[in-house]
């Protein structure tokens, strides 16, 4: 396997790794053979805009082992700002792929986050899909700060090597930044609402939306309350276009 470090580009102040799903899996496999925990974080336009006003989120992103291009807006920005063609690596697809790998290789995993009901249903669905998977432990995400040391202890005691954290952004990135140095896992992926999808509480977009890279539109249509969050997308696109024009102007001057 080619395990060279992927090219890391800057998208409006946020680092992003240029890789596809196969390369992401190769790097996670390497992390699993490493000596310390590595964070895997999905980057999308909403997260880029949030990071512009959050030094803590920027720190979490910059310290991550892998920053996958989750949103189609990131793919667009990579092409416009850097002339690089990349493909999306959705975090909601990387997690099941990692679970399949963990099942084949008998690598224990831990599920942390979401409600107790969703967490349990997600674990049941993973066991249904991957009968050989070793879910070493699970903990819902409604835990107070005073209980976090106990959560960290339970994760370490479980022997898990892959930890999935479903606390939503930016809370999960902040959690990983704070607690990853204390954990014995080797890979920690922030998975947002993926537990809800696995539990059947939230449906992924139909194939036609996925093929057209319109999953964001399906989410908005199926849940109009996301409108306030989706305002980040036009801001991201506008900033990307402005940045591109600035870069081109500077190139002509030079």
Image (cartoon, rainbow, N blue to C red):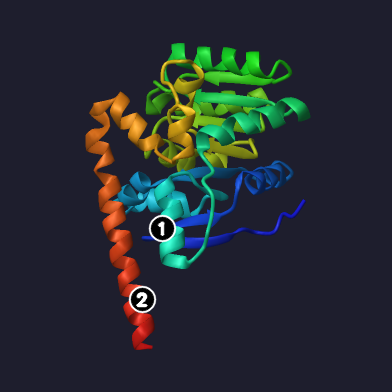
Asked if residue 171 can be seen in this view, the reply is: no
- Depth check: give the residue in front, 71 or 52: 71
The answer to whether the residues at label 2 and label 1 have Cβ atoms under 8 Å apart is no
- Depth check: give the residue in front, 215 or 186: 215
Which residue is the site of mark 1?
77
Please give the count of numbered marks on the rendered protein: 2
Relative height, residue 27 to residue 148 (above, below):
below
- Depth check: give the residue in front, 152 or 190: 190
Relative height, residue 71 to residue 111 (above, below):
below
Query: Which quarter of the picture shows residue 224?
Result: top left
Position of 83 with respect to 232 (left or right) is right
Q: Secondary structure at mark 2?
A: helix
Q: Residue at image x 66%, y 49%?
A: 23
Asked if residue 179 can be seen in this view, the reply is: yes
Q: Which mark is residue 248?
A: 2
Q: Residue at image x 47%, y 35%?
A: 210
- Depth check: give the residue in front, 229 or 87: 87
Name the spot of residue 148 as percent of width and height, x first.
Answer: 46, 28
Alpha-carbon distance for marks 2 and 1?
A: 14 Å
Name the spot of residue 209 as percent of width and height, x first.
Answer: 43, 33
Position of 29 with respect to 182 (left or right) is right
Query: Which quarter of the picture shows residue 201?
Result: top left
Q: Residue at image x 31%, y 62%?
A: 241
For label 2, count other residues whose C-alpha is less than 10 Å away and answer few (under 14), some (14-19) or many (20+): few
Relative height, residue 117 to residue 28 (above, below):
above
Q: Secondary structure at mark 1?
A: helix
Name the spot of residue 95 as percent of width and height, x first.
Answer: 57, 32
Name the spot of residue 67 as percent of width and height, x first.
Answer: 52, 49
For label 1, count other residues whose C-alpha is less than 10 Å away and answer few (under 14), some (14-19) or many (20+): many
Position of 83 with respect to 241 (left or right) is right
The earlier-in-sequence mark between 2 and 1 is 1
């Amino acid at each position: 396997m080619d395990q060279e470090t992927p090219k890391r580009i800057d998208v409006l102040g946020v680092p992003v790794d240029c890789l596809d799903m196969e390369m992401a899996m190769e790097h996670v496999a390497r992390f699993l053979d490493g000596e310390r925990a590595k964070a895997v974080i999905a980057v999308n336009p909403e997260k880029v805009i949030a990071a512009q006003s959050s030094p803590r989120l920027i720190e979490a992103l910059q310290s991550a082992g892998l920053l996958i291009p989750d949103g189609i807006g990131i793919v667009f920005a990579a092409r416009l700002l850097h002339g690089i063609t990349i493909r999306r690596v959705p975090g909601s697809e990387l997690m099941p792929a990692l679970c399949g790998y963990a099942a084949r290789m008998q690598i224990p995993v831990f599920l942390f986050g979401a409600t107790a009901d969703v967490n349990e249903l997600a674990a049941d669905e993973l066991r249904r899909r991957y009968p050989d998977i070793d879910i070493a432990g699970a903990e819902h995400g409604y835990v107070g700060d005073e209980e976090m040391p106990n959560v960290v202890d339970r994760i370490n005691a479980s022997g898990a090597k892959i930890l999935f954290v479903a606390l939503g952004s930016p809370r999960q990135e902040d959690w990983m930044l704070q607690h990853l140095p204390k954990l014995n896992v080797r890979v920690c992926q922030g998975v947002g609402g993926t537990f809800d999808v696995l539990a059947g509480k939230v449906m992924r977009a139909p194939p036609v939306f996925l093929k057209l890279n319109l999953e964001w539109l399906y989410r908005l249509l199926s849940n109009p309350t996301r409108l306030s969050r989706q305002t980040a997308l036009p801001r991201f696109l506008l900033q990307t276009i402005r940045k591109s024009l600035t870069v081109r102007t500077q190139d002509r001057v030079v």
